[in-house]
Amino acid sequence: MIKIQKGIPDSVIKEVLQRNDIVETVGKYVHLVKQGKYMKGLCPFHSEKTPSFTVTPEKQLFYCYGCGQGGDVIKFVSELEGYSFPEAVRMLAVEAGIPVDWDASEHQADTPFQRDRSSLLAAHEITAKLYHHLLNNTEFGIGAKDYLRSRGLTDKLIDHFMIGYAPDRWDTLTNFLSRREFDLELMERGGLLSSKNDGSGYIDRFRGRIMFPLWDREGKVIGFAGRLMGEGQPKYLNSPETILFNKSKSLYHFHQARQDIKKTGRLILFEGYMDVIKAWESGVRNGVATMGTSLTDEHVEIIRRNAQEVVICYDGDKAGQAAALKTIPMLEKARLKTSVAVLPQGYDPDDYIKDKGAEAFVREVMSQPVSPLKFRLIYSRKSHTMVEEEGRKNYVLEAVRLIAQHESAIEREFYLKELSLEFDISLDTLKQNCHQVREQLQKNKPNGDNNAFSWNNGMNEKRRSAGPPPVLPAYQKAERHLLHVMLQDADMAGIVYDQLGDAFIVEDHAALAAYLYAYYAQDNGPDVSRFIATLQDDRLERAAASILMMEDTPFDEQLLHDYVKVIRKEQKLRLIEQRREEWTRAERSGNHLLAAQIVTEIIALERQLNEGLEDRF
């Protein structure tokens, strides 16, 4: 029997698939246009300019001809949101109003990894509550509470963000977890404790720090950031990389900001936790921050899946502006509309709100972001001495180079006019210089999207090679046609089983056939979405989705027999080739008796092959 997922009843999977229409679900993320019996749009899994992403309402499947992603509605949500299979089922069940009470009675961690993860999640949750309690209700937290209030944090904010305090003691958390029978060695691996230098036991990892819980996208605590109130290094101490926490894939407060991000299509990217917190109080509810690292490609992918526009709001100092310059190309490469909220020199969002107020922050900073080009010009200007003629000249030359790199002719002219008016230089002169720079840039530009060797002018050069798709061998076509029918007709699947079994030549096809026979053996009727949900294997799910996207054509038992013959012929050809190799080895080793036996087998196989061809004609 094929198990979909221990802890989630098969009836729930079936109901989730029935009550979550794939067109409606995908339509929340992708603009779909009807084309015949299909819905088409730009793929959300890779960047493209020409739609290759297809949804089939009749079969409740999606498939992208560009990147090969495919599957049912559960697979779509799982891949797009980065959920595990159970998490995707849970989300879709909640949206469809299906009770999610199976966890209480049936969900258990099966593997050691799952048990460790479950234990660490429980430990992190209870640790966050402990630190929050120590901050609010004990003498340990008095100084930390006063410090937070001096930074402008209200009790309401402290409670909302579950801010806490880790006392400057060695064993507060260690004893707390030990009394609750948590495995301390696991807690050390999970980043909550540290082992003593002499190996005699464990101590608290975080001591004398204000504690900021870090959550995953589901709102589960997966780590901490501990901040010193006074002097010392490091100012922030984050949880290490663990089975729960990966700083390159986590965004601070994303779980709470996500609703507003989806609603507005816009995400605000801050540098620090305090910036997110103070901005939240100011009414900016779609703000997130990286967790102790620069923006990564993984972060960008999370952002791309949830927003269409990003406003960068980094610190106003040189380091913050340099970080913004580094971040802009990463966001632009993902085709996200990008702008920068510019802060005065020396200000970060937290300081600006504290000095000028929340209303001014929203009105003067967040409501007036500048384009990436404008921000580059502002940054360039600061690196030149504008009171000197040489400095002004160098700035104009650099500004023209920056403007020349911009694709929009309208925006180029707009900024060139600004330069012309400010520096009293002929607009024609600036345009001529800009044109020369663009020509030189074009000469230096390597082969990219705008050439005959790209596919779909997207960010998928590595996904596709030049030229038309390869022609499949006859046996592969035969196997795909058989599986296409078997997935939709249990009787035909039974006939194929009698004639061929799972003796398909392509490995994935053989695996799909075996799974399909088992699926029908459970008295399941043809239901491609439900079958795909049983696979739990990315490669097989993609293979099944690709096969199901084939056009439905007339099919009968004679055609089935013809396909089976093609496959059997290929099997015999491969067996003959294998025997010839064995014959060669036997001859070289001087085993002439074995070589003679193999020749006899080869002759018999070739005769069978020829007889099969005669029968066919």
Image: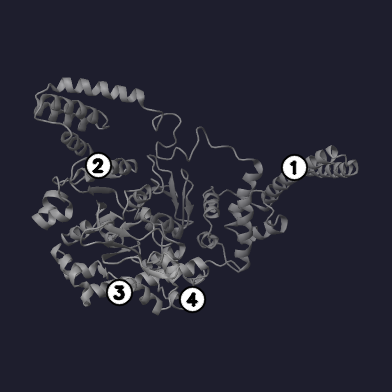
Callout 4, which amino acid? Glu
Marks 1/3 in contact by CB < 8 Å: the verdict is no
Which residue position holds label 3?
130
Q: Earlier in the sequence, mark 1 or mark 3?
A: 3
Using the image, tell me which numbered label, if any, was put on residue 426. none
Q: Which of disc 3 and disc 4 is earlier in sequence?
A: 4
**Few, some or many residues within 10 Å of mark 1 (<14, 14–19, 20+):** some
Q: Locate residue 97 relative to residue 544 in the image: left or right.
A: left
Q: CA distance from mark 4 to mark 3?
A: 29 Å
Closer to the N terminus: mark 3 or mark 2? 3
Q: Which mark is residue 322?
A: 2
Left or right, 583 with respect to 145, comes to right
Name above or below for residue 42 compared with residue 150: above
Measuring from the top left, give residue 174's x and y in whole percent: 37, 73
Q: Amino acid at mark 1?
A: Leu
**Element carrying mark 1:** helix
**CB contact under 8 Å: marks 4 and 3:** no
Q: Are marks 4 and 1 in contact (CB under 8 Å)?
A: no
Work out whether mark 4 precedes mark 1 in sequence or the reverse, and give the earlier one.
4
User: Residue 232 at what x, y percent from top left?
Assistant: 25, 58
Residue named by callout 4:
106
Q: Answer yes or no: do the residues labelled 2 and 1 have beta carbons within 8 Å? A: no
Dividing the picture into quarters, in which one does residue 583 lie?
A: top right
User: Furthest residue to the right?
Assistant: 593
